[in-house]
Amino acid sequence: MPNATQKAGTLLGIKAILLLYPAAALTAAILVLGYLYRLTDQKHAEMIAEIEARP
C-alpha cells in the first residue's frame, strides 16, 4: 500500500538491516584479508622480483 505509515518495529527492522548487513560484510572482508592473506616480507620480496622480471 503506497504512502502507508510504517510501525516503529518495522522501521527498527529496516534500520537494523541497513546497519547489520554492511557491518557483517565488512567484518567478513577484514577476516579474509587479515587471516587468509598473509603478506610476509619474503612473499613481498618475491612479488617485487616477479614484477621487475616482467618485460
Image (cartoon, helix red, strand yellow):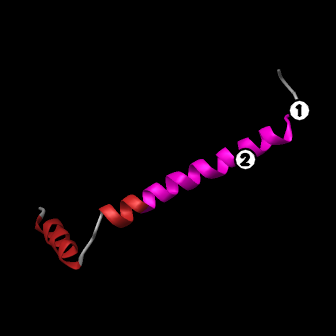
User: Residue 9: horizontal and vertical position, in percent?
Assistant: 80, 41
Residue 15 — which label?
2
Depth order, front residue of 38/43: 38
Image height check: is 29 above or below 8? below
* Quadrant showing the N terminus: top right
Residue sitting farthest toward the bottom? 41
Look at 13% across and 63% down and name the residue there. Answer: 54
User: Residue 10: horizontal and vertical position, in percent?
Assistant: 78, 38
User: Residue 53: horizontal and vertical position, in percent?
Assistant: 10, 67
Image height check: is 55 above or below 5? below
As helix, strand or loop, the secondary structure at mark 1 comes to loop
Task: Kindly indicate whether the residue at mark 2 contacts the one at mark 1 (C-beta within 8 angstroms).
Answer: no
Residue 5 — which label?
1
Look at 72% across and 47% down and name the residue there. Answer: 15
User: Considering only order in the chain, which callout, 2 or 1, is on the residue closer to the N terminus?
Assistant: 1
Q: Is residue 15 left or right of residue 35?
A: right
**Quarter assignment of residue 28:** bottom left
Residue sitting farthest toward the front? 9
User: Residue 47: horizontal and vertical position, in percent?
Assistant: 19, 68
Q: What is the magenta segment's predominant secondary structure?
A: helix
Residue bounds of the magenta highlight? 6-30
As helix, strand or loop, the secondary structure at mark 2 comes to helix
Amino acid type indicated by mark 1: Thr
Residue 29, magenta (yes or no): yes
Look at 49% across and 58% down and name the residue there. Answer: 27
Q: Residues within 10 Å of mark 2 (few under 14, many from 20)?
A: few
**Quarter assignment of residue 29:** bottom left
Amino acid type indicated by mark 2: Lys
Residue 16, magenta (yes or no): yes
Residue sitting farthest toward the top? 1
